[in-house]
């Protein structure tokens, strides 16, 4: 039996020996790449953003706010930190990581929605975090979600299992091959040229009575302390409720309650709350690809309108 | 705990070391270690259901001794019935309660009688309940038939019932095979252990690279998307047959391989079933532990009971046994239909051929695959058998009979001859590797048995490293083993 165990150890040894160097090469490559989600993370964690105005939020932030339009109109440097699929807890983690490596912004445009004040259980698009698990902020943020195990955090290379694309991108970047985003992301913003996808109609069919937007007390408290911290650090937060298709609005049965929380917090911290949920754009379906997200033409029209509204605030 | 998880990768060597290095001098302690490890393994899912295994263990331990302890045939029968009732009672409540209530309401509903007041319960199905209840029942049945003496060693019996390699998804062991191995001192055999490790690797290859990668194709084709062409549906159906095979036989390989590490030999559960040249041969190669169990404890008693009715009696026994086999798989009419389709396939054999058993733990001489002369004819028969089995598997995978039927109907369309739409082709590479490995080793116990000491070490190790690397790079999203739900 001892002979067998010895043989097994000899068999496993080369595997263990290559784990760490391979992990190092792949991680190093991914930390340089400009490919998809890594482009934003690398810019943030390498302190390359240094924006005057950052846009915070989930997917509604990331597809609605065009930094280029805000830049040209407001004569400042804006950057979109919106995270697809994430609600406030992860948004805050990204903001903290940003502050650690970049100068504090003068303004934060905080996109809010019906789902901002809750949390999700599992990591969405978990691969975007894999190269940064050595970063304290990313580490703490991801640990709050399901999706990565103890082994992913502690055993080299294991977190890249079944990620052939990431492995090749990381390895080739390390060798000097550049990978640029396949999508048209610019300064964190993606304008999606999509037409109405019909998911709203399916939603209505499945939930004719509507749904209750989750509001978690713990998240509301975290949101409140984030607003307080920004105020203490002279970061001006502007809450923005971007347009949403008007047909959906009556299906959030506690809509008034959620909007009331935003109103209350705006009053408490003396913040501007720009609410576009009654904007005429909301009734025009051609500006949306689903009930929550505007397409490129809608987003850019909205960004111009927002820039106009912000001029006065920024001037003051 | 999943076999294809990191937790298991730590659990297995730890248990192995304790088993062979810490408690190896004392059989009772070794069995106790095995029992504790098995309860930990099962409790990892949901510790509450350990109570069910314990109840099943105590019931059969006590009733087994009662059956043996009396000469009164009526009492013997009573104790046996109690054992069957206890096991089927657990199974019936946790697995079939809602199914029968819903079927009751629906059946009366068709006659306009409203029974919708009868309520279903929110019952969680305990993992592997169909497997261990059948295993413990075999103990009482074998004692009743005089084929086994009951044990007085409760720890050993508990280890037999809950033996972790095969607890959750089989093979469903017979007490007459596994219990004596638990009761006697095990001796470490390095060759068996090495073969066990190879079999575990083969099982992981099947699960991680074949079953889990095919899963995505299967999910999309069985999603009810009506825009899919008939050719895409046909590929999806074929993929499901291979998915379920790779998933389930992969589990069996890991279970059997793991047992070998502990000096225990489990029964073979799959013998390359897709190389069968007839339906009856298929059932001697597929899920052998279940179908031989059903053969011995359901089909043969029924056949004896109906023997005066000649071929009609045999027909009845076959249809009832396969109907039960379908229901064993799941509480749904689609599973029953899956079983009945097999019975329908075997019906001509009853009238025009010779059907002695529905399954067997041993292959017939004629089941051995010839490589001379008849190969082309054999391959043709294999394809035909595969198509028939494949059609029945559609009902196994579809959520309802109606959806299964729609799937089959949609296959018969002119678009059957158009190129199928496939998002990825990578799973087919692994599938072809699997088929080739199995084909060239079809006379072996498992497809990686060929890498024995006659093959140079660098070739063997090269293959093992290649498989591990492929699993690391290309493995599909981790899925539970399909048979856990049964």
Image: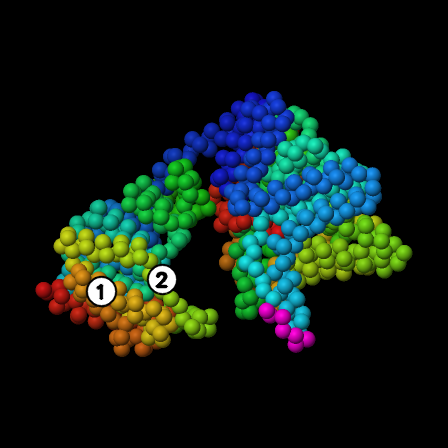
Can residue B443 be seen here? The reply is no
Q: Is residue A13 above or below residue B241?
A: above
Residue drawn at (31%, 59%), measured in percent from left and top?
A117
- Location of residue B365 in the rendering, given as x and y in whole percent from the top left corner: 81, 42
Q: CA distance from mark 2 to mark 1?
A: 18 Å
Spot the residue most to the left: A316
Is the stretch drawn in magenta largely helix, strand or loop?
Answer: loop
Is residue B358 or residue A286 the one in the foreground?
A: B358
Left or right of A158 in this view: B146 = right
Which numbered disc covers residue A214?
2
- Location of residue B37 in the rendering, given as x and y in whole percent from the top left corner: 56, 35
- Location of residue B154 in the rendering, given as x and y in whole percent from the top left corner: 65, 34
Residue drawn at (69%, 56%), measured in percent from left and top?
B326
**Disc 2 chain ID:** A
Q: Which residue is mark 1?
A: A264
Residue drawn at (27%, 77%), measured in percent from left and top?
A280
Q: Quadrant of residue B260?
A: top right
- Location of residue B211 in the rendering, given as x and y in whole percent from the top left corner: 57, 49
Q: Quadrant of residue A30?
A: top left
Choose the circle earlier in sequence order: 2 or 1: 2
Is residue A303 or residue A26 the one in the foreground?
A: A303
Within 10 Å of disc 1 (Cα), the crowding (few <14, some 14-19, many 20+) is few
* Magenta residues (range): B111-117
Is residue A175 or residue B285 the one in the foreground?
A: B285
């Amino acid at each position: 039996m001892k002979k067998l165990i010895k043989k097994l150890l000899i068999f496993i040894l080369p595997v263990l020996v290559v784990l760490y160097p391979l992990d190092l090469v792949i991680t190093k490559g991914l930390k340089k790449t400009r490919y998809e989600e890594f482009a934003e993370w690398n810019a943030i964690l390498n302190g390359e953003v240094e924006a005057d105005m950052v846009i915070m939020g989930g997917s509604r932030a990331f597809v609605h706010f065009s930094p280029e339009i805000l830049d040209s109109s407001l004569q400042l440097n804006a950057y979109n930190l919106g995270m697809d699929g994430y609600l406030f807890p992860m948004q805050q983690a990204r903001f903290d990581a940003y502050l650690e490596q970049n100068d504090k912004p003068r303004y934060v445009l905080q996109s809010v929605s019906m789902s901002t004040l809750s949390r999700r259980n599992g990591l969405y698009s978990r691969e975007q975090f894999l190269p940064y698990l050595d970063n304290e902020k990313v580490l703490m943020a991801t640990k709050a979600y399901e999706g990565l195990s103890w082994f992913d955090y502690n055993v080299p290379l294991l977190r890249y299992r079944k990620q052939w694309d990431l492995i090749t991108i990381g390895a080739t970047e390390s060798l000097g091959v550049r990978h640029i985003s396949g999508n048209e992301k610019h300064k964190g913003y993606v304008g999606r040229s999509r037409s109405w996808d019909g998911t709203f109609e399916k939603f209505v069919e499945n939930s004719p009575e509507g749904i209750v937007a989750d509001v978690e007390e713990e998240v509301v408290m975290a949101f409140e302390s984030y607003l307080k911290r920004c105020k203490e650090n002279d970061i001006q937060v502007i809450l923005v409720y971007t347009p949403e298709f008007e047909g959906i609005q009556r299906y959030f049965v506690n809509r008034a309650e959620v909007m009331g929380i935003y109103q209350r917090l705006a009053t408490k911290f003396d913040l501007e709350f720009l609410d576009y949920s009654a904007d005429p754009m909301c009734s025009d379906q051609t500006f949306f690809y689903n009930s929550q997200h505007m397409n490129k033409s809608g987003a850019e029209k909205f960004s111009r309108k927002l820039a106009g509204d912000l001029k006065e605030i920024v001037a003051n | 705990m999943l076999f294809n998880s990191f937790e298991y990768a730590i659990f297995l060597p730890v248990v192995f070391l304790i088993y062979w290095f810490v408690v190896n001098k004392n059989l009772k302690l070794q069995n106790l270690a095995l029992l504790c490890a098995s309860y930990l393994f099962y409790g990892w899912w949901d510790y509450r259901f350990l109570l069910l295994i314990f109840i099943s263990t105590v019931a059969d331990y006590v009733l087994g001794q009662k059956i043996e302890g009396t000469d009164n045939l009526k009492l013997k029968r009573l104790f046996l019935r109690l054992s069957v009732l206890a096991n089927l009672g657990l199974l019936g409540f946790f697995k079939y309660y809602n199914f029968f209530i819903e079927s009751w309401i629906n059946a009366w509903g068709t006659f306009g009688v409203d029974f919708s007041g009868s309520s279903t319960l929110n019952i969680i199905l305990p993992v592997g309940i169909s497997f261990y209840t059948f295993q413990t029942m075999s103990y009482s049945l074998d004692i009743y038939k005089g084929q086994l003496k009951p044990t007085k060693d409760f720890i050993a019996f508990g280890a037999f019932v809950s033996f972790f390699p095969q607890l959750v998804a089989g093979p469903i062991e017979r007490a007459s095979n596994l219990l004596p191995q638990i009761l006697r001192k095990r001796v470490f055999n390095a060759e068996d252990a090495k073969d066990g490790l190879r079999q575990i690797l083969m099982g992981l290859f099947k699960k991680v690279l074949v079953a889990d990668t095919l899963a995505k194709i299967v999910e999309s084709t069985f999603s009810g998307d009506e825009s899919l062409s008939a050719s895409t549906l046909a590929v999806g159906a074929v993929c499901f047959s291979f998915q379920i095979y790779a998933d389930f036989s992969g589990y069996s390989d890991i279970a059997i391989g793991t047992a070998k590490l502990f000096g225990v030999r489990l029964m073979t559960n799959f013998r390359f079933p897709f190389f069968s040249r007839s339906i009856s041969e298929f059932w001697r190669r597929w899920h052998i532990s279940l179908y031989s169990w059903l053969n011995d404890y359901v089909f043969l008693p029924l056949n004896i009971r109906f023997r005066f009715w000649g071929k009609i009696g045999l027909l009845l026994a076959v249809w009832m046994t396969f109907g039960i086999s379908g229901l064993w798989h799941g509480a749904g009419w689609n599973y029953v239909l899956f079983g009945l389709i097999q019975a329908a396939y075997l019906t001509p054999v009853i009238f025009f051929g010779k059907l002695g058993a529905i399954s067997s733990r041993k292959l017939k001489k004629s089941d051995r695959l010839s490589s001379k002369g008849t190969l082309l004819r054999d391959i043709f028969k294999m394809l035909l058998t595969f198509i028939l089995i494949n059609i029945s598997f559609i009902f196994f995978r579809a959520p309802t009979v109606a959806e299964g039927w729609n799937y089959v109907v949609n296959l018969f369309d002119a678009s059957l001859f158009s190129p199928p739409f496939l998002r990825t082709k990578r799973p087919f590479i692994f599938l072809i590797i699997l088929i080739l490995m199995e084909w060239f080793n079809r006379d072996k116990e498992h497809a990686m048995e060929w890498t024995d000491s006659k093959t140079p070490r660098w070739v063997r190790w090269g293959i093992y490293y290649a498989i591990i690397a492929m699993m690391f790079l290309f493995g599909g999203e981790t899925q539970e083993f399909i048979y856990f739900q049964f």
